[in-house]
Image: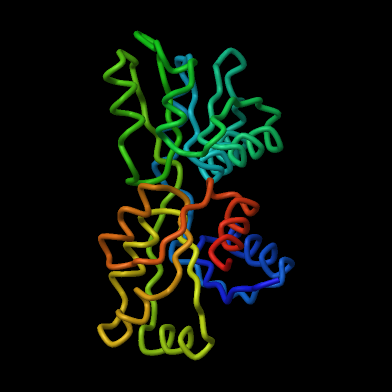
């Protein structure tokens, strides 16, 4: 079986878990998270957001669920029992159930567009919707639900911060290690990476095989000069591994 030499850029702990999974498939893996995730002080807004229980609670990621659940536990609060819970993907829904016993619906394909296509979000006129998310990020869900007539509140539960590379060391090491594939699961990761590529390594970087989690990230990668881009069917370990296998054929 053909194998790849892969750079995994996901934040921890997901980066390490993905790296271990890919090593079990026989690939060589270097793990370097491009984003660091931590609790956002703004999570204190969650208490007031739950004062009048929302009709719908949406989690954008498993990190949003994890930090929100930790905060509620610390405050002696519970998740509202009457709300409809929606998650952007299967992993986020699974985290909610494991931590709190919350059953959340999720789309088959993990992205904002497919979440918005769920029948539970159309119509939502006059519904109170709480979105749990990280700092920044895409405003698509909030904008679309507001346009549909929902009363939307967002709580930024966690912070995503770019990790600063040591270009003279990191890129030289990756090249020496014969990295030939890079996994990118968000546009923010790709932007962070490309903003730090030294000019002498840019052409080498652009020749690498890029494994991305959506067509939207592919468009960003194309604009950044990548040509060999493969789009996985989501960001799960299995989907990314299958995409790598296809890229090697």
Which residue sits furthest right? 24
Vertical comparison of 139 with 127: above or below: below
Count up the numbered dots: 0
In the image: residue 49, left or right of residue 5? left
Place of residue 141 in the rendered image (x, y in percent of width and height, measured from the top left): 36, 30
Q: Position of residue 239 (x, y in %)?
A: 60, 51
Between 6 and 188, which is closer to the camera in this rendering?
6
Residue 64 in picture, x, y percent from top left = 51, 41
Q: How is the image coloured?
A: rainbow
Residue at image point 39% right, 77% down? 165
- The residue drawn where x is 46% and y is 58% is 230
Q: Quadrant of the C terminus?
A: bottom right
Q: State the residue in front, 197 or 222.
A: 222
Residue at figure coordinates x 47%, y 51% from the top left = 213
Camera-side residue of 142 and 69: 142
Q: Position of residue 215 (x, y in %)?
A: 39, 47
């Amino acid at each position: 079986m053909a194998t790849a030499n892969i750079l995994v850029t996901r934040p921890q702990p997901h980066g390490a878990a993905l790296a271990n999974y890919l090593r079990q498939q026989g690939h060589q893996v270097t793990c370097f998270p491009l984003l660091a995730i931590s609790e956002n002080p703004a999570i204190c807004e969650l208490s007031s957001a739950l004062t009048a229980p929302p009709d719908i609670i949406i989690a954008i990621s498993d990190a949003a669920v994890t930090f929100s659940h930790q905060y509620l536990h610390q405050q002696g609060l519970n998740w509202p029992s009457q709300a409809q819970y929606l998650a952007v993907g299967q992993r986020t829904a699974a985290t909610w159930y494991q931590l709190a016993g919350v059953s959340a619906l999720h789309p088959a394909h993990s992205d904002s567009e497919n979440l918005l296509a769920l029948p539970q979000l159309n119509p939502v006129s006059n519904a109170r919707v709480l979105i749990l998310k990280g700092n920044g990020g895409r405003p698509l869900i909030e904008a679309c639900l507001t346009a549909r007539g929902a009363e939307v509140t967002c709580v930024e539960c966690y912070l995503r911060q770019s990790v600063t590379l040591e270009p003279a060391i990191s890129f030289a090491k990756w090249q020496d290690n014969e990295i030939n594939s890079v996994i990118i699961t968000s546009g923010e990761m790709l932007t962070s990476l490309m903003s730090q590529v030294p000019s002498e390594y840019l052409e080498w970087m652009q020749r690498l095989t890029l494994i991305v989690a959506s067509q939207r990230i592919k468009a960003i990668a194309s604009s950044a000069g990548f040509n060999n881009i493969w789009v996985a069917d989501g960001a799960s370990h299995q989907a990314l591994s299958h995409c790598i296998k296809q890229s090697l054929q």
